[in-house]
Amino acid sequence: DKAHLLLRSYLTDRTQQCQENGVVSSEHKVKCGVPQRSISGPLFFLIYINDLSECLNRTKPRLFADDTNLTASGGTINDVENAVNSDLENLRMWLNANKLSLNIAKTEFMLTGSRSLVHTVSDSNLNIMIENRPIKQVKECKTLG
């Protein structure tokens, strides 16, 4: 079928090269992914990650482009910590299975609630981890979308 052939030709037999300080690298074959800066690239990415939310059992995801936010609530701060850490492990496994990676350096968590609650919890030792690495706690963050 023509649509299948068109899509296949769009995604296979591609090469890429980089340029830095006027020096151009040799071409390298691209084995996976969608063409960067393409009109249809974001759509293909969204189709690819469409089932991401299915791996999250205890948090609620919000996705915008390639930015994902997880929201959790619970009766105690330990409930929230356990929920987030459990789903971060689920997310890690989903990413590995789908040959994607998480930029842990850009990953942060933030507490929301009353000032007294946030202050009390901020003073406690909250351990949000992924791949046995602690996630940085912030007081504010930017949300895309």
Image (cartoon, rainbow, N blue to C red):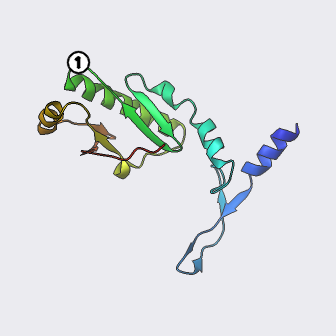
Residue 52 vertical position relative to residue 138 in the rendered view, above or below: above
Tell me what residue is drawn at x 38 percent, y 29 percent. 87
39, 96: nearer the viewer = 39
Q: Position of residue 74 (x, y in %)?
A: 27, 21
Q: Residue furthest right?
A: 1
- Residue 140's image quarter? top left
Asked if residue 132 can be seen in this view, the reply is: no
Q: Secondary structure at mark 1?
A: loop
Q: Residue furthest bottom?
A: 22
- Residue 119's image quarter? top left
Tell me what residue is drawn at x 45 percent, y 45 percent. 144
Residue 34 vertical position relative to residue 115 in the rendered view, above or below: below
Residue 54 vertical position relative to residue 47 in the rendered view, above or below: above
Horizontal placement of 24 versus 67: left or right?
A: right
Q: Residue furthest front?
A: 114
Three-letter residue code for mark 1: Gly
Asked if residue 70 can be seen in this view, the reply is: yes
72, 29: nearer the viewer = 72
Residue under pointer 1? 75
Q: Position of residue 111 (x, y in %)?
A: 25, 36
